Amino acid sequence: MLNKFGDRMNHKIGRNDICPCGSRNKYKKCCMKAEKTFVSNISTVDFKWRQIRQLEGAVIDNHLIPYAMKELPEKVFTLAFSDFFPEDFSEDLDMGIFLHQFFLPWYLFNWIPFEDFDLEQFAPDKTIGQNYFTFYEHKLNNQEKRFFEAINQSYYSYYSVLEVELEKSLQVKDILLGTTHILKEKQGTHHLKRGDIVFSRILTLEDQSIFIGMAPFSIPALYQDGLIDFREWLIEENDDVSLTPKDLRDKFDIEIFECFFDIVKINKCNPSFRDYTC
């Protein structure tokens, strides 16, 4: 255990001992309460974060991947892959990270094939996740059903990092919508810094928000002005009406992804850009 000065404690401090911080007060009236609060907060955040991540894993690993692999023909994945990645996408980038962290959530929750693949139980105008929910809802527990409902309301956007609280949370601002969000996050707090831009979707469930399907690169802060210009272009394309989550999800999803891959193409020779993973 470390005290507030970073020194290792070799024995347990008694409630009535003098606090090692130097205040000359008893430990129970000084740092003991603060340390208990700190540990409690970390434990609470960690539990809630793990709970949502475990739910995400259960839906994807126990339901959607087995469904996609066993009941859908291989050409479904192939078609989705060609729809997602640009033809000139650089293969020297880490495809493993792209596939697992970025492509897979999009494939399951965003991609609409517009083809039934000669399957009786498959709606071509719905995502793979929505198809599974339609035909296999009875296999889902209540928490998993709420997860599907929440992720169907999510959308991809560009988020500027405002504050980073190590091991706990990120405060971000949606560049396209102007909204501010606080996310329960652990890994991201070790990689991201104020000013970085993240391309992802936010899932909010029971007042807790996390990133799902985050792009494996942060975008340099110098792209902030360019993304604001991109937002203004989207508004023009939207008949000069302010953007909504539904617009980003249903109307401009292709343009939003094309913008990201354009940025990747420009920065593919920048090692700091290429090496970022969250």
Image: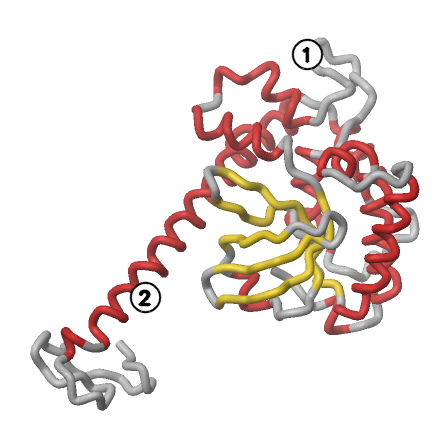
- Residue 133 coordinates in the image, percent (x, y): 59, 21
Point out the tag, 2 or 1, that comes first from the N-terminus. 2
Query: Could you tell me the amino acid type at mark 2?
Result: Phe
Query: Could you tell me the amino acid type at mark 1?
Result: Gln
- The residue identified by callout 1 is 121
Query: Mark 1: few, some, or many residues within 10 Å (few <14, many ≥20)?
Result: few
Front position in the image: 78 or 54: 54
Q: Can residue 96 be seen in this view?
A: no
Q: What residue is at 66 percent from the left and 51 percent from the top?
A: 214
Image position of 101 (left or right of 48)? right
Query: Mark 2: few, some, or many residues within 10 Å (few <14, many ≥20)?
Result: few
Front position in the image: 118 or 267: 267
Query: Decide: marks 2, 1 in contact (CB < 8 A)?
Result: no
Quarter the N terminus occupies: bottom left
- Residue 268 coordinates in the image, percent (x, y): 83, 65
Q: What residue is at 73 percent from the left and 22 percent from the top?
A: 126
- The residue identified by callout 2 is 38
- Residue 89 coordinates in the image, percent (x, y): 87, 53
Is label 2 in a helix, a strand or a loop?
helix
Q: What residue is at 73 percent from the left and 24 percent from the top?
A: 73
- Residue 269 has which mark? none
What's the CA distance linking mark 2 and mark 1? 51 Å
Question: From the viewer's perspective, is residue 268 above or below residue 100?
Answer: below
